[in-house]
């Protein structure tokens, strides 16, 4: 099913998702010994955070289908990114 005239474009949300996945990979490479020690729950946690981060692409796709105005799309994307950062870093 194709949406007529739809073009997936660069937004705040998908840029943040790319940066998040890249930083997750870099963190995993440099801290692999610590993550895989013991029972390996650190590796599972990093994979879970990566999957949650990657789900932002689906959220961004849905938002781009709903909102055509780029300014509104980027404001909502920024709010989603801020909510994600709050949940990941401050709700422990």
Image: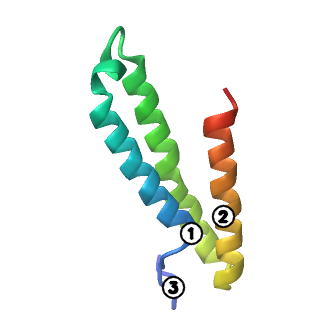
User: Residue tagged by mark 1?
Assistant: 12
Tell me how far mark 2 sits from mark 1, CA to CA: 6 Å
User: Residue tagged by mark 2?
Assistant: 78
Of circles 3 and 2, the one toward us is 2
Q: Earlier in the sequence, mark 3 or mark 2?
A: 3
Residue at position x 48%, y 65% in the image: 15
Which x, y percent locates residue 54?
46, 51
Left or right: residue 86 versus residue 21 is: right
Residue at position x 72%, y 78% in the image: 72
- Label 2: which secondary element: helix
In the foreground, 59 or 53:
53
Tell me how far mark 3 sits from mark 1, CA to CA: 18 Å
- What colouring does the structure picture have? rainbow
User: Residue tagged by mark 3?
Assistant: 6
Left or right: residue 82 versus residue 54 is: right
Of circles 3 and 1, the one toward us is 1
Neighbour tally class for label 3: few under 14, some 14-19, many 20 plus, Cα within 10 Å: few
Q: Is residue 28 above or below residue 26?
A: above
In the image as oriented, which residue stretches furthest toward the top?
A: 38
Residue at position x 68%, y 78% in the image: 67
Q: Is residue 85 above or below residue 71?
A: above
Residue at position x 40%, y 47% in the image: 23
Q: Quadrant of the C terminus?
A: top right
Q: Quadrant of residue 36?
A: top left
Q: Earlier in the sequence, mark 3 or mark 1?
A: 3
Which x, y percent locates residue 26?
32, 43
Neighbour tally class for label 2: few under 14, some 14-19, many 20 plus, Cα within 10 Å: some
Circles 2 and 1, Cβ within 8 Å, touching? The answer is yes
In the foreground, 2 or 14:
14
Tell me how far mark 3 sits from mark 2, CA to CA: 21 Å
């Amino acid at each position: 099913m194709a949406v007529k005239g739809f073009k997936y474009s660069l937004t705040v949300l998908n840029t943040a998702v790319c940066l998040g996945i890249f930083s997750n990979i870099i963190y995993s490479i440099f801290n692999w010994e610590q993550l895989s020690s013991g029972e390996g729950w650190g590796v599972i946690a990093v994979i879970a955070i990566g999957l949650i981060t990657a789900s932002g692409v689906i959220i961004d796709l849905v938002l781009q289908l709903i909102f055509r105005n780029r300014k509104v799309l980027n404001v909502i994307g920024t709010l989603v990114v801020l909510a994600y950062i709050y949940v990941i870093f401050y709700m422990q």
